[in-house]
Image (cartoon, coloured by chain):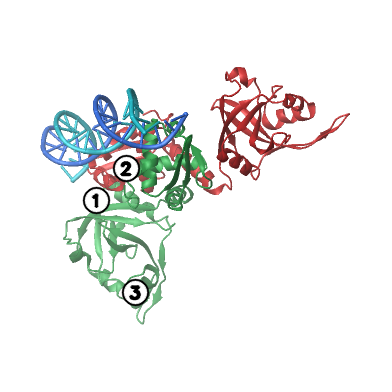
Chain colours: A red, B green, C blue, D cyan
Amino acid sequence: MDPLKPDLRSWKLLFTLYKLAELGATSRTVKVSTEYLSEKIGASQQTASRHLINLEKIGWIKRTITPDGCLLKITSQGVAELKKLYSELRLIFESEYPPSITLEGVLFSGLGEGAYYVTKEGYRKQFMEKLGFDPYPGTLNIKLTTDYDVHALSELEAYPAVELEGFNDESRTFGPVKCYPAVINNKAKGAVIYAMRSHYGASVLEIVSPTFLRSNLKLKDGNKVKVEILILP
Amino acid sequence: MDPLKPDLRSWKLLFTLYKLAELGATSRTVKVSTEYLSEKIGASQQTASRHLINLEKIGWIKRTITPDGCLLKITSQGVAELKKLYSELRLIFESEYPPSITLEGVLFSGLGEGAYYVTKEGYRKQFMEKLGFDPYPGTLNIKLTTDYDVHALSELEAYPAVELEGFNDESRTFGPVKCYPAVINNKAKGAVIYAMRSHYGASVLEIVSPTFLRSNLKLKDGNKVKVEILILP
DNA sequence: ATTACTACGGATCGAGTAG
DNA sequence: TCTACTCGATCCGTAGTAA
């Protein structure tokens, strides 16, 4: 029943809350009988009553019982719950792109040159500015193993990215780079560097992060790694 | 499990569908394991699996099982379900007014003059045009009995209405009238006529409909009548 | 590693009913 | 009438496990 950890249980209540919102309970105090509500939610009068009791308990509605119905109003907390649902759906339907893409692959040791590029001041400054972290001097190389993952990565190209500008060094030119914020193994923050180099073809993910992930996440070569790439809205 | 009649049961599946949409399954084929999905919906792997089976059964998703996860895409039918939810929420939050207001009162016999006004060609024509029905020559008078109902009726004034224009007869002038489409006792279509006359003060609802409601709904003086007033978006 | 079956137990529901 | 309690029945999520 913890509203902070929405699971199937509180979702049932959210459905009832949603139906109350349909009756106008977000803006006005509405009078509904539990019998009437039960028809709206497709359950029994007793279930409707119980739901109202629980909704009041978790603070999503304010309830006053009268001899011929309940006077109900959704609290600001309840409205916030519905708005959360609403804005998530808006993101899904109004955004051109999916909110995230999750890929999986196998960790392997690269040639160590990721570190070289990442520590170049020209890039490093931009990592801090645009991604919000100072990159650990080294990258994680993930080999994609399935057709699905390779294909999904190729789709990524069309999505909006964080763009790092190219720059000139004393000795050479460094090209522009595209990055995508990402979450590694559901835990660590980082970013996928797209096409920094094409040594490995289109089936390798190169990941930069603020910490040494191999030790932080206890990763070894050959481990499966999950990378959730976040698409900018 | 009937998708056309959303209840607590199908809502559970809609919840899972919504979580799949968050993963981008509306626009792409996504690979998710039932274990991963179970975390997203706050349930067990087995429950996630069952939900996917049921979602496929009712045609909301297309599913391909692979050795390391399911390839899932939400069907157009599934997307339609989510859009229905989305547009309902949009109506709730983006509309200035509640979608409907339900009032209750007691039927009583009026002075019979409702019939006089309703049959005037000047009004009758507009009823047919703007409300879509030819009014039965007679109205239903509902006396509101609780403070809640009287107060709710007074709020109605601020909401957008169907406006019938005034007109001139040989003998006199008929003023403009505001109407609200309504459903009587969850069954019959009709309309509330607002302030056609103020004989009864602010605690009486006058209802016009295409049929003789007293016989149609088996109503007698003193019966409780429920009127759901529909607010224009 | 997956998916998804069976068995079980607790959560939830609806009938009856009290207040 | 209304709400909401108790109490069986049912449902459904979970554990264990097969494929």
Q: In the figure, is residue D2 to the left or right of A155?
A: left
Say which label, 3 or 1, has the lower sequence index.
Answer: 3
The disc numbered 1 marks a residue on which chain? B
The Cα atoms of the two marked residues, 3 and 2, are separated by: 45 Å
Instruction: Estimate how packed mark 3 is, as few (under 14), some (14 to 19) or many (20 or more) residues with alpha carbons within 10 Å.
Output: some
Q: In the figure, is residue B102 to the left or right of B158?
A: left
Determine which residue is flagged by label 1: B145
Farthest residue in the right direction? A170
The residue at the point 75 percent across, 27 percent down is A124
**Mark identifier at residue B9:** 2
Q: In the figure, is residue A95 to the left or right of A60?
A: right
Say which label, 3 or 2, has the lower sequence index.
Answer: 2
Say which label, 1 or 2, has the lower sequence index.
Answer: 2
The disc numbered 3 marks a residue on which chain? B
The residue at the point 23 percent across, 42 percent down is A45
Regarding mark 3 in the picture, which secondary structure is present there? helix
Tally of marks? 3
Percent x, y of residue A110: 69, 26
Farthest residue in the bottom direction? B170
Regarding mark 2 in the picture, which secondary structure is present there? helix
The reply to whether the C-beta atoms of the residues labelled 3 and 1 are less than 8 Å apart is no
Q: Nearer the viewer, residue B41 or B126?
A: B41
**Mark identifier at residue B115:** none
Percent x, y of residue B166: 40, 72
Residue A68 visible in the snapshot: yes
Percent x, y of residue A82: 44, 40
When asked about the image quadrant of residue A33, the answer is top left
Percent x, y of residue B108: 20, 60
Determine which residue is flagged by label 3: B124
Type of amino acid under label 3: Arg
Type of amino acid under label 2: Arg
Type of amino acid under label 1: Thr
